[in-house]
Image: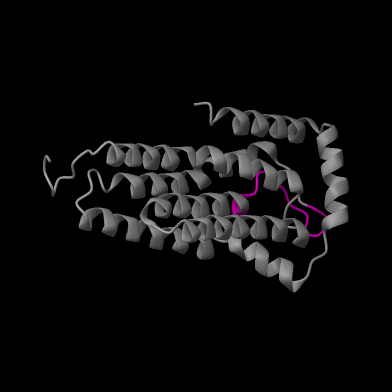
Amino acid sequence: MLLLGPPVVLFALITWQVVAGGPLVAADERLSRALVHPDQASELLADLGNVQVAVPVLVMALAYVAWHGRATGADRWWLPPAAGALAMALVPVLVAPLKEWTDRPGTPAVPPAVGYYPSGHTATAVVAYGAATLLLLPLLRSPAVRRGLVVLCGALVLGASYGLVRRGYHWPLDVAASWCLGAVLLTGPWLVVSRSRRRRSAGTPSRRTGPS
């Protein structure tokens, strides 16, 4: 539960500022004006948060983790991929009503509209790439490969986030709030993976091997 505290508090603070039009919003708008510069590169980076791009990456990771767990006879092999899939499914469930409630207008770089807070593309990137990384890490033996996967995950999330702000699709606070939301949603897969690793390190037998 301690893991949930900081992102929940920060998300609540940002949301309060957005709804109340507080001083953070004024600073956010100034920062956006300084950063926005629509170009092809920012468009491509923003696309990393598209459902059509991020979700297939997660689906492939879930399929591999499920296959590996079943093939090795792991206990409750289905639980980690189910946790990852649930985290992804909760993104639209939470983001859609928040967009409607906050009713935040977009930046001057997009046509006049509302419902930009929080950023659904950022939340999709955080959860899809983050969950895929969390589930794959225990299956990788090489420390260098594990570090590389973490770096790649961070690069994809930061790239999508930067692209969304640079292109003007979202205010910086929209993106920051979705980082917090994504961190909360990734707590579930992280706990499942952590418990699975503890069971393996404690020598819990799998269904295939039986008691030692």
Spot occupied by residue 45 in the image (x, y as percentages of width and height): 66, 65
In the orientation shown, which residue stands out farthest toward the bottom? 40
- The answer to whether residue 119 is magenta is yes
Q: Viewer-proximal residue, 207 or 147?
A: 147
Q: Viewer-proximal residue, 96 or 200?
A: 200
Spot occupied by residue 177 in the image (x, y as percentages of width and height): 66, 41
Q: Is residue 182 visible?
A: yes
Q: Is residue 99 visible?
A: no
Which stretch is magenta? 107-121
Spot occupied by residue 59 in the image (x, y as percentages of width and height): 40, 60
Q: Is residue 125 above or below residue 181?
A: below
Q: Is residue 53 above or below residue 108?
A: below
211 displayed left or right of 93? left
How has the structure been colored for display?
A: one colour
200 displayed left or right of 112? left
Residue 207 occupies quadrant: top left
209 displayed left or right of 169? left
- The answer to whether residue 110 is magenta is yes
Please name the predominant secondary structure of the magenta segment in the image.
Answer: loop
